[in-house]
Amino acid sequence: MDTKCVIKIIMNSPPNSNSSHIKLYDLQLVIQMCRGNDEQVLKMVEVFIDQISQSIKEIETAYFQSDFLKIKSLAHKIKPLFTYFGTSKLEKEFILAEVLLSKEIISSELELKIINLSLIAKEVISEMKNDFNIAYE
Amino acid sequence: MNKIVKKKILVVDDEISICMLLQNFLSQEYEVITIYSALEALDWLEGNLPDLIISDIQMSNMDGYEFLIKVRQRGFTKHTPIVMLSGRAESKERIKCYRLGAQDYLTKPFNPEELEELVKKNLYPIHYAIEW
């Protein structure tokens, strides 16, 4: 399926309309901001995938260095993007992680949260890559 | 035939996705220049004068507050309207920006329609008021 078809399907279907599989993202806002331009939407998706992959890597590294300030800063910076790309599951995990991060203590709960963040981010990326036929590295 | 000159908006944000979203959304009506760092934006302002600046606050090297101070200190951009963007919704952040000379403050993630109105309000303040 080409990108134009994917974007048209996304535009015409209400968010999370498929009962058998809940979509991990919703591009309505991105499509609105790109004024329906398919090429721009695709570029946005590609940039989002790159940014999320990079940020998750940096968060994992910062966690193992106990650099809470850096994790907080990275999370704060990236969080608004989740709204634009409708990745509410990922956004929720980030908000919960931020609460744990504010305690600035390494805990099994926080570690679990970081692992979970990373897993959900990978799921989102994988779904986007499949939907938009973006090659895996 | 007279050529319509689009108003020029400078967007300063080190977050490439935000810059792209703003560019995609605003470029239909305006000329949008995106720059990923405040220092580079100051260099660009040496030879260019935008009609409006939209700047993020949390940026590496130079943050939005320092950028705002520098823009206000410069003669040519002393009165250029500036809209600050931030992920923080606290009023103390807004107050700080207003005291440093920002016209408006928008919290990320922003509603595109609100952004559109803020841009219009700052680019065409008198016309905007007449429409009331």
Image (cartoon, rainbow, N blue to C red):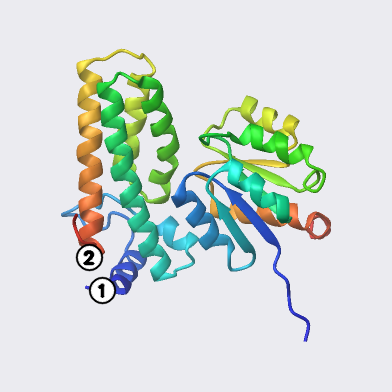
Give the secondary structure at mark 2: loop
Count the marks: 2
- Asked whether residue B121 appears in the rendered view, the answer is no
Where is residue A120? Give x, y as percent. Answer: 23, 41
Q: Is residue B81 left or right of residue A120?
A: right
Give the secondary structure at mark 1: loop
Where is residue B90? Give x, y as percent. Answer: 58, 28
Where is residue A39? Give x, y as percent. Answer: 39, 69
**Disc sitting over residue A133 in the figure:** 2
Of callouts 2 and 1, the N-terminal one: 1
Name the residue rendered at 25%, 50% in the picture.
Answer: A125
Q: Residues within 10 Å of mark 2 (few under 14, many from 20)?
A: few
Q: Is residue A116 left or right of residue A7?
A: left
* Vertical position of residue B58 compared to residue B54: above or below: above
In which quadrant is the N terminus of chain B drawn?
bottom right
| Amino acid type, residue under disc 2 in the picture | Asn
Question: Are the residues tagged 2 and 1 within 8 Å (C-beta)?
Answer: yes
Where is residue A51? Give x, y as percent. Answer: 35, 46
Q: Chain of mark 1?
A: A
Name the residue rendered at 64%, 25% in the picture.
Answer: B92
**Disc sitting over residue A2 in the figure:** 1
**In the picture, residue A74 is in which quadrant?**
top left
Return the residue found at the far left.
A20
Q: Residues within 10 Å of mark 1 (few under 14, many from 20)?
A: few
- Asked whether residue A119 appears in the rendered view, the answer is yes
Question: What separation in Å lies between label 2 and label 1 (alpha carbons)?
Answer: 8 Å
**In the picture, residue B72 is in which quadrant?**
top right
Name the residue rendered at 71%, 50% in the picture.
Answer: B46
Q: Is residue B48 left or right of residue B126?
A: left
Callout 2 and callout 1 share a chain: yes
- In this view of the protein, which residue sits in the foreground, B64 or B112? B64
